[in-house]
Amino acid sequence: MFEHLCYCTNIHPAETWPETFDALKEHTLSVRDKILATTRDHASAYPIGLRLSAKAATELLEGENLSNFKYWLYTNKLYVFTINGFPYGEFHNTRVKEQVYAPDWTTAERLSYTADLITIVSDLAPQSLGGSVSTLPGSFKEFGADENLIFAHLYAAAKLLESLSAETGKDLHLGLEPEPLGHFENTEETIAFFDRFAKWAEAKNFPSDIIYQHIGINYDTCHFALQYEDAATALKTLTDAGLRISKIHLSNALEIKLTDSNSIEEIKQFDEPTYLHQVIIKDAEGAITRYKDIEDALNHKSQISNLKSGVARIHFHIPLHAAPKSPFTSTIQHTIDTLNYLKVNPGVCDHLEMETYTWGVLPDELQIPIDDQLTEEHLWVLEQ
């Protein structure tokens, strides 16, 4: 069932459409050829998980760019079925941190950007598979977002998805991605958000069924592992609540046991200025403490040092095929459990995307050429 497995091209620094296209030509074709050299599956087309910034999306819709891209995909036996629409602007080589949530779903800019992505995927996605777009979980908790604005813009996106699905005959959907310290971040908060969303629609005499049909969850295995959730339980609870699993991100977080007062100091080596690395700690009694970033956790080192039987998980994506250096372990078991759940429940989701975007900031011992890393990750998933 993993034939529609792709890697997310957000790993390649690119903010314009020409830069994005160049990265696909340089890296994606190389990764495909490396995988084919191992699997010998030359008959199948190779899927792409496309990442487009707002600028790149606008440029792709200009002139003949989209039709030229479709021809290039066809001639190279490639196809696009999903687009990552979480980061709006620059995503590499600059301070991203909490600004990855901006503009959030309270803004017209986020809706317009996502509408462009929906339009693009509606054209590119295979008829039989449909198309998905992933996006942020509404906003970031610290922003104190107006939820009514979030609902209004998301409902507009649902109506566009419904219209284009009817027009194209394709199953098109948007996946909101719960993330630590996002507007909603775990199973309980996710279900509560969708319940409020449906009640908002019903209060306005809007049909709520299009919400559940066209808006779902982008289930990121790193993010749910950071919340110390069990994969099978979380997926079953979400689907039992009527929520759609739009896409699954296969990704991996760091973990370290707080065996002594110096344990938390070990995470300092992963403190870097580009991405937000939330630290989630679970003590022996099961209580959860959340820190916005590694720097924040280190500033509370004396408090954390008392949790000597606790565990810290850090939002720093580690390649699926590679174990971090001791004393760290990873949350890879959550990814394995997710894949095992999909084997038993294949109808839950058939859009799978690997998303280790931190290649440029990984420690030296985890650095290998990027095309090799992507190939190794892909082969590791297939082996599962």
Image (cartoon, grey):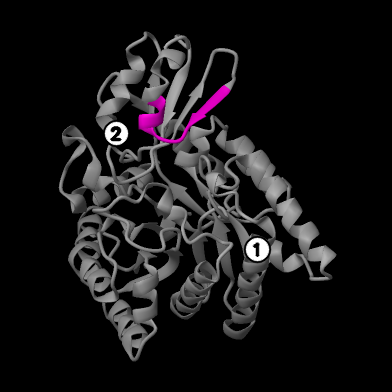
Residue type at numbered disc 2? Asp
**Mark 1 or mark 2, which is nearer the start of the sequence?**
1
Q: Residue at x 65, y 56 (%)?
A: 146
Q: Which residue is drawn at 36% across and 19% down?
A: 264
Q: Which of the pair 343/294 is nearer the observer?
A: 294
Residue range corresponding to the magenta coloring? 288-297
Q: Which of the pair 66/171 is nearer the observer?
A: 66
Residue type at numbered disc 1? Leu
In the shown orientation, is residue 1 left or right of residue 252? right
Q: Residues within 10 Å of mark 2 (few under 14, many from 20)?
A: some
Q: Is residue 236 visible?
A: no
Q: Which residue is drawn at 51% across and 65% down?
A: 132
In the shown orientation, is residue 63 left or right of residue 349? left
Q: Are marks 2 and 1 in contact (CB under 8 Å)?
A: no
Name the residue tied to disc 2.
271
Q: How crowded is mark 1: few (under 14 residues within 10 Å), some or many (20 or more)?
A: some
| x and y, in percent, of residue 60 in the image | 35, 80
User: Which quarter of the rendering shows the C terminus?
Assistant: top left
Structural distance between the alpha carbons of marks 2 and 1? 34 Å
| x and y, in percent, of residue 67 in the image | 35, 87
Asked if residue 65 is positioned above or below residue 246 in the image, the reply reads below
Asked if residue 218 is positioned above or below residue 203 in the image, the reply reads above
Tag 2, which secondary structure?
A: loop
| x and y, in percent, of residue 257 in the image | 40, 17
Residue 338, disc: none
| Pair 2/1: label in front | 1
Q: Which of the pair 253/267 is nearer the observer?
A: 267
Name the residue tied to disc 1.
149
Tag 1, which secondary structure?
A: helix
